[in-house]
Amino acid sequence: MMYYQALIYIPYAILVNIFASYLLTDYWLNVILDKYIGDEPVITRYFDHIVVGGGTAGIAVASRLAENEAHTVLLIEAGPKVSLLYDIPLATPMFQKSPIDWKHRTESQLEACLAMKNNSSQWPAGKVLGGSSRINFNIHVRGHISTDYLSWQYEQDWTKEDVLYYFNKYEKADTYYNRSPNKKQFFSHQPTHVTPIATAILEAANELDFNTSFDMNNDGFHISRRDGGSFSLTPVSIRTGARLSAEHLYLKSRKKKNLTVLTNALVTKVLFKHNFEANGVMYNRFDQVYKVHALKSVVMSAGTLNTAKILLSSGIGPAHQLKPLKIPVIADLPVGENLQDHIITGLDMITLEKSLDLTFKDFISPINIFKYFFKGTGTWTHPGCEAVGLLQLPSDKKNYSVSSPDLQFMLLPYGVSSDAGAAYFNHLNFKNEIWKEYFQPLVGRQVISLAPVLLHPQSRGYVKLDINHEIVVQPNYLQKTHDVSVLVQGMKLVKKFAETKPLSKLGAMFNTKHFPGCQKYKFGSDYYWECYIRHMTLTSYHPVGTCKMGSIHNKSVVDHSLRVHKLNKLYVIDASIMPSMPSGNINAVVAMIAEKGADLIKKHCFQRTQKCKITDFLYYGNKY
Ligand SMILES: Cc1cc2nc3c(=O)[nH]c(=O)nc-3n(C[C@H](O)[C@H](O)[C@H](O)COP(=O)(O)OP(=O)(O)OC[C@H]3O[C@@H](n4cnc5c(N)ncnc54)[C@H](O)[C@@H]3O)c2cc1C
């Protein structure tokens, strides 16, 4: 980088550091306050329901269960609460590798992640009240509702109508929980702030004959062969400019006396009566070990990796793995198998002659700060992703009425090079030589990323425990040729977008520099793109599937009512139960699962004990 270019980034680096220091201080202050003047730890009390993990799913489940005032509910979260400045959407990338990130990383990949140190991918996840909904990019999509959930269906459960009912229930939760006529319903159909590239991409999509008039979150959304694909501005879960996490949605108002929220408490094991009935959990809090008991249900909502870890540590998992680790087997089930993730690639592939005004000057402009705090608009509300597209790859063999889209496109008005190496390069774990050779020469230029995402990977990975009982994360990225070929077609389409008239008007140029390690292939050939994708294999942050839902003969962990097979009163309700991936970002899908899961628990509890209040049940659990 030239000397004068480096100078430009000095104020940016100072700003980032000041803000990072604030976040850190806020974090430690919250932890210390919780330790010394927070709620008393729950020592040997009994609750009706215990929910492990205060993330997207756990918060929704605990809040819904607590609607029955006759029941007591304990929500246990490993991370702390955080405060106001964490709500700024523009600050989102700063949460990765911070204390509120679990900082998971994958095993070294054989034929993927070749541009990353140790060929390993960093997998962030929220370790904070709100979970990953507190560190995500706020994209709110339901997937391709007409086809994505067909394979989940079982009798009356998980039908298209059922799934729609719970998406709608979640989307109306804000109206229900925060009843104030001045507050808008939580998810907006449009991001609050976009740059001119968003309009240009939608016009380009039109030029390429894709549909741009669909609302992707409409109940009847479907992409036919004729449409081929659909692009729109990104629907986001942002209210009045600020992040709307699960915590904001369900916990910030309508405090319930029968719901106890315990933060900074790490659950290590599920406890059982007669090795069959879950009746509590063990947890560590500020170096003390506690046990707490549940009368009606123990719900695991610790996310795809940690739910699997806790179950395996408790003796629920493949017997052949647990026995050598000297963990007594309670139920021999395929916990940890079926790990899947969306892969994203193609960052920094387009440069523009025009600036999009998303520079440090815009970040620190007093006008933008004023706009954020007083109007809920402006650069600070920028969600990261400005537009999304869903695409069916053409095929004569495909039945379009039951086929899900193959690719998602995410439009980011920046790339790895945009912060001059301050954060993204490190978050994504790139090797130093890749940075120097490929990304650093782009510093100071306006880059954008129209990044293709593989929606339905065929490769399957796993999570298991190592000899120290820590988790090993092996996604087996790009083990199937299908996964590579879908992404190759995605990269070819990015080039087509760069060549459209709307992008040419902004001075768009496709980045034709050979990626380090792929010089021997002709640029743009299928072999070249395969090599590129195997180097630039990035997570889209959507691990799912380690506690797969299905019938017992179907090698699954939970049944269609989300109860762990072979055991009593133990539920899994989070991203880990997904048997297959939805066509899009998964937060809303997890919330839909949680809304349904809470109703299922109410139904079982009612059937078992008849002690639930019938009026509550009819009102909230009216599906049953
Ligand atoms: C960086 C990032 C960006 C993303 N962007 C988007 C997006 O824009 N749109 C979208 O739809 N999806 C996005 N996602 C995905 C989405 O946010 C997650 O899939 C979703 O939040 C998962 O919900 P969950 O309830 O399964 O897990 P989480 O929300 O991760 O919740 C799990 C909770 O359990 C807690 N926990 C874990 N272990 C323990 C333990 N032992 N004891 C106690 N508590 C424990 C965790 O601290 C956490 O709070 C993103 C994810 C990440 C990480």
Image (tube, rainbow, N blue to C red):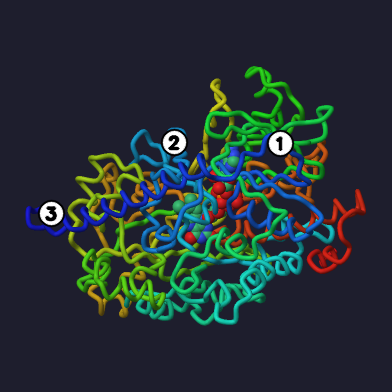
State which mark lies toward you, 1 or 3: 1
Q: Residue at x 39, y 66 (%)?
A: 411
Left or right, 168 with reference to 196: right
The image quarter in which residue 314 lies: top right
Q: Position of residue 364 (x, y in %)?
A: 25, 66
Disc 2 Cβ-to-ligand 1 distance below 8 Å: no
Closer-to-camera residue (20/90): 20
Q: Residues within 10 Å of mark 3 (few under 14, many from 20)?
A: few
Q: Which mark is residue 292?
A: 1
Q: CA distance from mark 2 to mark 1?
A: 40 Å
User: Helix, strand or loop at disc 2?
Assistant: loop
User: Helix, strand or loop at disc 1?
Assistant: strand
Looking at the image, tell me whether mark 1 or mark 3 is earlier in sequence order: 3
Q: What residue would you read off at disc 2? A: 109
Q: Residue at x 59, y 55 (%)?
A: 56
The image quarter in which residue 295 lies: top right
Q: What residue would you read off at disc 3? A: 6
The three-letter code of the residue at mark 3 reads Ala
